[in-house]
Image (cartoon, rainbow, N blue to C red):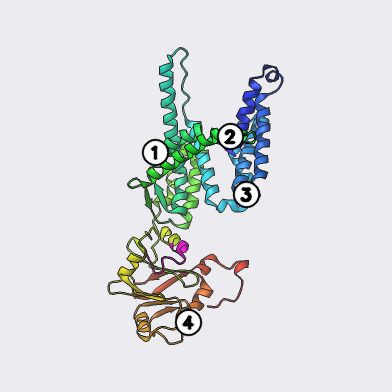
């Protein structure tokens, strides 16, 4: 949307300004805004109307509409109107990280623009001095923009993605000029000239810029201490952080800084206790916490769910089969704990085929037994046993080991609550 709308707006305004007869008779800025708006809406239809493009089109429509009615195109008022429009058309968007992070970053950048000092331009300063001053100003603005946008999006990144990018400011400073001066103009010119058979050269420039940005991203991501994984904060901390960011952006003067500690709520809030065991909703996958590591009994099954649980709890799930085999004895159908295992848990995910008596005895030797299928009554007496019926009723589960050796379970169904798509008999 930025490429299409921005390129059309700039090109039309330049062409009108280059034609004095037309420039004296129409408002070039409004004409360019009208055609830019038309291009954005046309591209929205051409793209198939996906939700991210729709949100971008709404924001661009508010900006171009502000130009048409003689209002400031880029302001907190325009951003608020865009957010209201998106919420009216897509109420579910407020739960999506993309919506939250994009509007939080934009609001922070607009608040920064209001605070940014306007430098007095010298009339007769030599051009080398002007170039140095402008370069220094652009560099400081880039650092400030990247830093502020990173701070505004960090609560959502911590809570939703459980990671901190250490070198994000450096990556942005290196990538933004390439994107602004090579990639985006190349893509825009390529799209315009492609129907005439002249788009190869600008698209080649854009491709070079994309490869360069990818190289920078790879180098930064591979640098030492590039990312840190952290556990998610309590559920209320993200809402408090969002309100703190809004307070910082909307209020002016010393009163603004009241929102600063609230904006860091996700970072400052104490983390809830991490569960010792995670089990998928069908009992087919089990993960165990061992210090700061998550041990997956079946690294190739339900990997997304296991990794999400590990990230939410601030654990590293990259150990794979070697980490599992060091603490648990696993075959194709089951896992049992070895001496010194971090958690005394055993699991079998296909007991319908039957298990050998010695294997069954090893399973029952663990303090917690997880069975994907239903098991005969009276098996593993004195042990906590979860079967297929439990998972059918409760879904996935997090299990906490108590001081007295018992287990406490948090079931997904209980936390989610009854919904129209989950109606049915409560099997537990």
Instruction: In this rendered view, identify the residue nearer to me: 79 or 140.
Output: 140
Q: Residue under circle 3? A: 50
Are the residues tagged 4 and 3 within 8 Å (C-beta)? no
Q: Which residue is mark 2?
A: 199
Q: Nearer the viewer, residue 337 or 234?
A: 337
Q: Residues within 10 Å of mark 3 (few under 14, many from 20)?
A: few
Relative image position of residue 309 (x, y in whole percent): 44, 62
- Determine the secondary structure under disc 4: helix
Q: CA distance from mark 1 to mark 2?
A: 32 Å
Mark found first going from the N terminus, 1 or 4: 1
Q: Depth-wise, is mark 3 or mark 2 nearer the camera?
A: 2
Residue lying at 46% horizontally and 72% vertically, measured from the top left: 284
Q: Which residue is mark 1?
A: 170
What percent of the width, then of the height, locates residue 390?
A: 49, 76
Residue 333 point in image, percent of width and height: 42, 76
Who comes first in sequence, dot 3 or dot 2? 3
Where in the figure is residue 168, as x and y percent of width and height?
41, 42
Of the image marks 1 and 2, the number of the one nearer the N terminus: 1
In the image, the segment drawn in magenta is 295-306
């Amino acid at each position: 949307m930025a490429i299409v709308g921005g390129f059309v707006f700039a090109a039309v305004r330049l062409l009108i300004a280059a034609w004095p007869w037309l420039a004296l008779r129409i408002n070039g800025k409004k004409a360019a805004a009208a055609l830019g708006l038309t291009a954005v809406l046309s591209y929205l239809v051409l793209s198939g109307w996906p939700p991210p493009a729709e949100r971008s089109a709404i924001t661009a429509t508010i900006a171009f509409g502000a130009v048409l009615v003689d209002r400031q195109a880029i302001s907190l008022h325009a951003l608020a109107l865009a957010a209201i429009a998106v919420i009216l058309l897509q109420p579910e968007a407020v739960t999506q990280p993309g919506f939250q992070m994009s509007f939080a970053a934009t609001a922070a950048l607009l608040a920064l623009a209001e605070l940014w000092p306007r430098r007095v331009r010298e009339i007769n300063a030599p051009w080398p001095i002007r170039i140095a001053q402008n370069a220094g100003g652009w560099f400081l603005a880039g650092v400030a923009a990247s830093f502020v946008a990173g701070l505004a999006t960090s609560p959502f990144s911590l809570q939703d993605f459980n990671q901190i990018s250490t070198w994000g400011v450096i990556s942005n400073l290196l990538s933004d000029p390439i994107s602004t001066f090579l990639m985006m103009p190349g893509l825009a010119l390529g799209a315009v000239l492609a129907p005439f058979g002249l788009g190869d050269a600008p698209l080649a420039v854009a491709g070079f810029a994309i490869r360069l940005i990818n190289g920078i991203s790879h180098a930064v991501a591979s640098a030492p201490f590039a990312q840190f994984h952290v556990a998610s904060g309590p559920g209320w901390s993200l809402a408090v952080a969002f309100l703190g960011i809004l307070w910082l952006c909307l209020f002016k003067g010393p009163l603004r800084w009241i929102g600063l500690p609230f904006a860091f709520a996700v970072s400052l809030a104490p983390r809830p206790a991490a569960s010792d065991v995670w089990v998928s909703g069908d009992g087919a996958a089990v993960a165990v916490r061992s210090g700061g590591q998550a041990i997956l009994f079946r690294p190739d099954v339900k990997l997304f769910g296991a990794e999400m649980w590990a990230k939410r709890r601030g654990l590293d799930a990259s150990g794979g089969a070697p980490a599992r085999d060091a603490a648990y004895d696993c075959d194709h159908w089951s896992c049992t704990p070895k001496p010194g295992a971090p958690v005394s848990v055993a699991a079998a995910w296909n007991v319908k085929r039957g298990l050998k008596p010695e294997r069954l005895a090893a399973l029952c030797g663990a303090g917690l037994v997880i069975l994907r299928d239903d098991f005969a009554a009276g098996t593993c007496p004195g042990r906590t046993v979860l079967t297929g019926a439990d998972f059918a009723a409760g879904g996935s589960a997090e299990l906490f080991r108590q001081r007295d050796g018992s287990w406490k379970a948090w079931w997904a169904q209980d936390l989610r609550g009854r919904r129209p798509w989950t109606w049915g008999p409560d099997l537990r």
